[in-house]
Amino acid sequence: MTEAVPAHNPQVVHPIEDHWITLDGARMRYLRSGSGPALVLVHGLLGYSFSWRHLMPALAPQATLYAVDMLGVGFSDRPPGLDASLRGCAERLVRFLDATAINSCNLLGTSHGGAVAMMAAALAPHRIRNLILVAPVNPWLEHGRRIAALLNRRSVKCIFLHAAPLLRPAHGYFLRRLFGDVRRIRPGTLEGYSAPFTVPGTFEHGVRMLNTWSQDLKELESLLPRIREIRTLLIWGSVDPVVAPVSAARLRQQFRSCAVVTLDGVGHLPYEEMPEKFNRVVAEFLAEKSVAA
């Protein structure tokens, strides 16, 4: 695959194609669009490829984009007994690269998907050209540890699993809390993110992810030296209520070449709140231009 970055041509329309593969005996969905070096997009916890609907048309002229629905979420299958640990997710992501004949790629992950991306890169560093991590879950995140510990209590877990599917009207409340400015929520956003929640097994998979949260982050920290040489970009919203921006400094120290872009007044979903600016930052990084915000 060529390393050249094609010139942007606004007249060329790159369709977004819906694809399915069989992975570990289950059907996995992904979207594909564009041309150029491969850019694999990994969503956050209980998110799916919908997260990248603004990014894909913008970057299609310079990259071949693969937006996955990881097994257990989105519109992919939810096989019983699926390994939901961070390593399990990362190993499946590497097998996805195998199944789609992606020998090397740029890898972008957000939130929990950022942790998956780092783990996958640690398992196969020779296959990752650049890392783009958007408010990634990381070993220096105390808030996430407290939430995981709470949800792992047997009584709380049972209540959550029984009540979560009935709380559809509350999804909007939780989504709004992820934004720095709720006026930036675009029409159809809530409906899009909520669409896969009706598929049985969605919330059970989310809880299984939390079961190994603390051990996962310890393992991730131990493996970070393997990806130290991978050129990396960190993108954070300055008022992120989920993954504290202060953890960016510790994470940045793990890489030899790492830029940090902070979007002022933005919450946990910068690709939703400021998609045009987010897309520009990512495009410039991949084109090896300045990543100054």
Image (spheres, grey):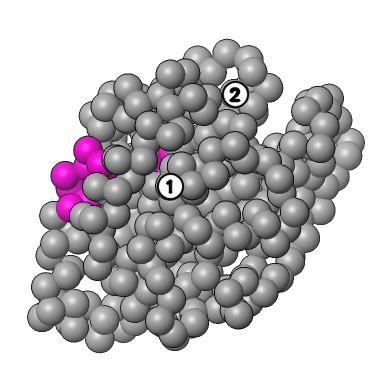
Amino acid on which the number 2 mark rests in the picture: Phe
Do the CB atoms of the residues marked 1 and 2 lie less than 8 Å apart?
no
Q: Position of residue 147 (x, y in %)?
A: 17, 58
Is residue 142 visible in this depiction of the protein? Answer: yes
Amino acid on which the number 1 mark rests in the picture: Met
Q: Which residue is painted at 71% across and 45% down in the image?
A: 103
164 left or right of 9 in image: left
Residue 204 vs residue 212, the one in the foreground = 212
Q: Which residue is painted at 29% across and 40% down in the image?
A: 221
Q: Position of residue 159 (x, y in %)?
A: 17, 82
Residue ID for mark 2: 285
Q: What residue span does the magenta drawing correspond to? A: 134-145
Residue ID for mark 1: 119
66 left or right of 261 in image: right
Q: Quadrant of residue 37?
A: top right
Q: Quadrant of residue 82?
A: bottom left
Q: Position of residue 110 (x, y in %)?
A: 45, 46
Q: Which residue is painted at 73% across and 58% down in the image?
A: 100
